Image: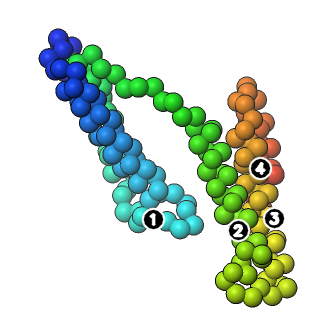
Amino acid sequence: MPQSQITLNASQRQRLLITCKHIDKLLSDIEATLDAAASKSVFPGYVEDISPIERKTIGDCIARVRRQLLQVLASQSLAPEPPHISAAHSISVNLTFIDIAIAELAPRYMRGYGPVSEKGAADLNGIVAELESSVKQLAQYISKPATGDNQQKDENLGRTGPRQH
């Protein structure tokens, strides 16, 4: 779509911007579904019934729609706002929620679901300790500023990460 003179009023332009943002969010949801279907999640939410070729085609179509959205916005002298939320901060917040969920697996909380045997308490304490250790390592990794030596940082996380059973 070629650059043209602004033909919409301020309210119409705002509606156009909001609709384009909504469309892009829905495209992101499609990408997230594709990623979730292909993930190695312990509790998958989707059946992986899209072939790699189909994934590529869908990705190409999404990219084309996004290019069109940018052209539409540019035709009315509009542009997407830059992001305002740090990805590292968002991950840190989610890790805090994970840490809380893990803590609630401790025997004192699990007693609310019935008596916990000594062996059960020991097992729960071990589960909590192991999960907390892994999450703490990830949280520390995320909280460190990016440096030119991220490969070393990545190798350290991999070496000290959760044990494979």
Seen as rendered, the residue at the extreme top is: 5
- Residue 129: percent from the left, percent from the top? 81, 64
Q: Residue at x 65, y 45 (%)?
A: 92
Q: Quadrant of the N terminus?
A: top left
Q: How many marks?
A: 4
Three-letter residue code for mark 3: Ala
Query: Which of the two discs, 3 and 2, labels the residue nearer the N terminus?
Result: 2
Mark identifier at residue 45: 1
Q: Is residue 112 left or right of residue 119?
A: left
**Residue at which label 2 appears:** 104
Mark identifier at residue 129: 3
Q: Is residue 144 left or right of residue 82?
A: right
- Residue 22: percent from the left, percent from the top? 31, 40
Query: Which of the two discs, 1 and 3, labels the residue nearer the N terminus?
Result: 1
* Pointer 4 local density, CA inside 10 Å: few below 14, some 14–19, many at least 20: some
Asked if the residue under mark 1 is in contact with the one under mark 4, i.e. CB atoms within 8 Å, the reply is: no
**Residue at which label 4 appears:** 137
Mark nearest the camera among 1 and 2 is 2
Mark nearest the camera among 2 and 4 is 2
Query: Which of the two discs, 4 and 3, labels the residue nearer the N terminus?
Result: 3
Q: Is residue 33 left or right of residue 78?
A: right
**Secondary structure type for disc 4:** helix
Examine the image and state in which quarter residue 154 appears: top right
Three-letter residue code for mark 4: Gln
Q: How far apart are labels 4 and 1 at the CA level?
A: 27 Å
Query: Which of the two discs, 1 and 2, labels the residue nearer the N terminus?
Result: 1
Q: How far apart are labels 4 and 3 at the CA level?
A: 12 Å
Residue 64 in sight from this viewpoint: no
Query: Which of the two discs, 2 and 4, labels the residue nearer the N terminus?
Result: 2
